[in-house]
Image: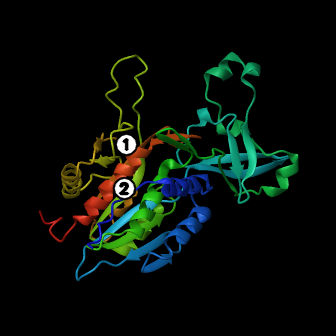
């Protein structure tokens, strides 16, 4: 009997894996908890695994045959969050942000602090005790504190990271969690390592410190020196109605419209050959997709494409609302279609892909 070709799936096991990944606390520079999950998941599926000096997990999965295209896939393990900077005693700590966070939405948010995920809350003066002028201004980070209570102050040290205490939850056809950016990319890349198409040499980089300057990807790309690269990420779905009631024409991406293929962002002009390859694959396979509106932001591709003599690069992202906040929302179908598009596109890559 002929073996059926692998079809990518997002089932209960993959959703449980994403739950485990998003619940892990791994702010930039302290990605250890997610790295441990990645190493556990890919141990029996990789031909070579290395952890480099910065903490990137670099995985090689050999293809079959000679001169297989060397394809790098990158997904970052880190998340935005906080760093404890000063102990004021009695369980109160000053902190600073790590990565792009909006200080206006921090007050009252529960957090987990340190390796033991000590519970705390971000506190400030109550709004009903604030002056009119204070209410009109965003509260400066210097006026906020993380409060873990007097009994827990010995569990927290200066330099510890903290992250939002938002447990993963499935809500109908959607997923709610912190750090969907980019644990959904990490979960996708784990699946592609487990089921790598045999026509390519798969070079999987689970990167560190993306949220503070694409640092890990720069090192990983130099090490791998691939023929081409795809960054797998999550991108903002700014698809809510416009505040003035007019049509939202600056939506970036939309939930429910499939994986987002990048044309350009603040760090990369995507390679036109790879954009065409992804679009042609999606149309041939009947996979819905959308083009991310050009604009700001950036992915690991911004660092990868400038390494060595230049690496043709593109990004593919799962759209999600409310990124870089305490809770983001993504659609299961968008994730499923992103995995399908990536697998199908990788399966169709050949030596001619970049020569067309």
Quarter of the image for the N terminus: give it.
bottom left
- Farthest front residue? 1
Task: Give the residue displayed 84% in from the left and 51% down from the top.
Answer: 152
Residue count near mark 1 (Cα–Cα under 10 Å), binned few <14, some 14–19, many ≥20: few
- Vertical relation: 106 (above or below) 65: above
Mark 1 vs mark 2, CA separation in Å: 24 Å
Residue linked to disc 1: 296
Q: Tell me where residue 245 appears, x and y as whole percent.
A: 39, 16
Q: x and y percent of residue 328 in the render?
A: 52, 41
Q: Residue furthest bottom?
A: 66
Front one among 8 and 355:
8
Q: Is residue 58 left or right of residue 112?
A: left
Q: SS of the residue at dot 2?
A: helix
Which residue, given by chain and number where applicable, does mark 2 sit on? 339
- In this rendering, would 350 be left or right of 107? left
Residue with the most extreme left position: 356
Image quadrant in which you'd find residue 232? bottom left
Q: Callout 1: helix, strand or loop?
A: loop
> Which residue is at a point 31% across and 52% down the rendered structure image?
268
Residue 112 makes an appearance in the image: yes
Q: Nearer the viewer, mark 1 or mark 2?
A: 2
Marked residue nearer the N-terminal end (1 or 2): 1
Determine the residue positioned at 61% across, 29% down: 138
Viewer-proximal residue among 238 and 37: 37
Circle 2 residues within 10 Å: few <14, some 14–19, many ≥20 = many
Quarter of the image that includes the C terminus = bottom left
Q: How is the image coloured?
A: rainbow
Q: How many marks?
A: 2
Q: Please report the residue visible at 32 percent of the width from the left and 58 percent of the height from the top.
A: 342
């Amino acid at each position: 009997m002929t073996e059926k070709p692998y079809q990518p799936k997002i089932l209960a096991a993959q959703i449980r894996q994403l739950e485990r990944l998003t619940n892990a606390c791994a702010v930039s520079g302290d990605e250890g908890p997610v790295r441990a999950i990645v190493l556990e998941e890919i141990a029996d599926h990789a031909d070579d695994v290395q952890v480099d000096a910065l903490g990137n997990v670099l995985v090689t999965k050999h293809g079959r045959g000679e001169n297989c295209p060397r394809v790098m896939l990158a997904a970052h393990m880190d998340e935005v969050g906080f760093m404890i900077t000063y102990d004021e005693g009695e369980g109160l700590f000053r902190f600073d942000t790590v990565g792009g966070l909006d200080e206006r939405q921090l007050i009252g948010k529960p957090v987990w602090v340190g390796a033991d995920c000590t519970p705390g809350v971000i506190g400030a003066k109550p709004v009903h005790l604030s002056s009119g002028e204070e209410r009109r201004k965003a509260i400066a980070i210097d006026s906020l504190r993380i409060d873990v209570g007097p009994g827990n102050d010995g569990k927290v040290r200066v330099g510890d990271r903290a992250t939002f205490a938002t447990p993963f939850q499935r809500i109908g056809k959607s997923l709610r969690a912190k750090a969907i950016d980019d644990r959904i990319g990490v979960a996708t890349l784990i699946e592609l390592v487990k089921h790598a198409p045999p026509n390519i040499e798969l070079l999987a980089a689970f990167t560190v410190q993306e949220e503070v300057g694409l640092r890990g990807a720069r090192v990983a790309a130099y090490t791998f020196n691939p023929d081409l690269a795809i960054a797998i990420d999550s991108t903002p779905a700014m698809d809510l109605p416009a505040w003035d009631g007019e049509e939202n024409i600056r939506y970036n991406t939309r939930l429910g419209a499939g994986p987002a293929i990048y044309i350009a962002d603040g760090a990369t002009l995507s390679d036109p050959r790879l954009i065409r390859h992804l679009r042609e694959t999606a149309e041939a396979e009947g996979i819905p997709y959308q083009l991310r509106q050009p604009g700001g932001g950036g992915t690991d591709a911004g660092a990868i494409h400038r390494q060595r003599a230049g690496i043709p690069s593109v990004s593919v992202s799962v759209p999600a609302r409310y990124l870089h906040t305490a809770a983001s929302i993504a659609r299961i179908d968008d994730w499923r279609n992103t995995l399908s598009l990536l697998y199908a596109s990788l399966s169709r890559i050949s030596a001619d892909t970049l020569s067309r």
